[in-house]
Amino acid sequence: MNNKIVQIVDNGEALIDIPGDFANEPMYFKQGLTDDDSIKLREGVVERLLKAKKNLPKGWNFKIWDGYRPLSIQEKLYKGLWDLRVAENPSLDEAGLKESVEKFVAFPSYDAKKPSPHNTGGAVDLTIINSRGEELPMGSEFDEFHERSYGNYFDIEPGSIDGMAGIYRENRLVLKEILKEEGFAPYKWEWWHFSYGNQDWAEFCGESVAIYGSKEL
């Protein structure tokens, strides 16, 4: 396993509000975790999402749940999942808890050399909606912290789990392939999470340098 930290040379791109071209649903505002109902991303990420949207079937769109995330929100999400895992698995030691939590919620890092992915403005959580505004069925809900949310869950499990398994698998593949075509990196534990420009993206794509660092630190 390569534990080398990818160097960051931030290109200085601005954080911008996601335009109304997309169906925006600021999930953490809806959940009361923040008073800010905007969703922001790096300018280059928005440009790539706009290009990716052109490859969706006519009338379809991306629904975006989250983008840039301040560390104050990251801390709340981390603690919330940590407490949930403790309640679910009281026998887990700290290392086991850390592994279980950090599959889904990154540690709220105050180290500028290893920022939390969403804190860079280079990570986005999203899905696809059809021409009727309905979310495509993906087999799990956004922020469902369960194995069903793993990107390949319906690839490695037999179709007998659920008669919809093939549809879930196909819909996840559509989302992943359209975004990969524009340079986004998928995240193996969450079908809805994609990165561009940050360290996760650099590691996935084999880039030696990440172009987005923390926008807060």
Image: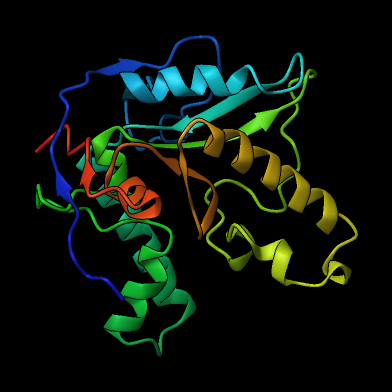
Model colouring: rainbow
Horizontal relation, residue 97 to residue 180: left or right: left
Quadrant containing the C terminus in the rendered view: top left
Report the residue at 33% width, 54% height from top: 203
Q: Nearer the viewer, residue 187 or 119?
A: 187
Q: Is residue 91 above or below residue 4?
A: below
Q: Is residue 25 above or below residue 211?
A: above
Q: Is residue 24 left or right of residue 4?
A: right
Residue 54 pos. (x, y %): 63, 16
- Looking at the image, which residue is at 9% across and 52% down? 111
Q: Residue 180: x, y in percent? A: 53, 39
Inspect this view and state whether residue 23 appears. no
| Residue 147 position by quadrant | bottom right
Q: Name the residue located 38 percent from the left edge and 32 percent from the top edge.
A: 67
How many numbered tags mark residues here?
0
Q: Is residue 143 above or below residue 10?
A: below
Residue extending farthest bottom: 91
Q: Position of residue 16 (x, y in %)?
A: 31, 15
Left/right of residue 121 with respect to residue 217 in the rendered view: right
**Front residue of 87 and 208:** 208
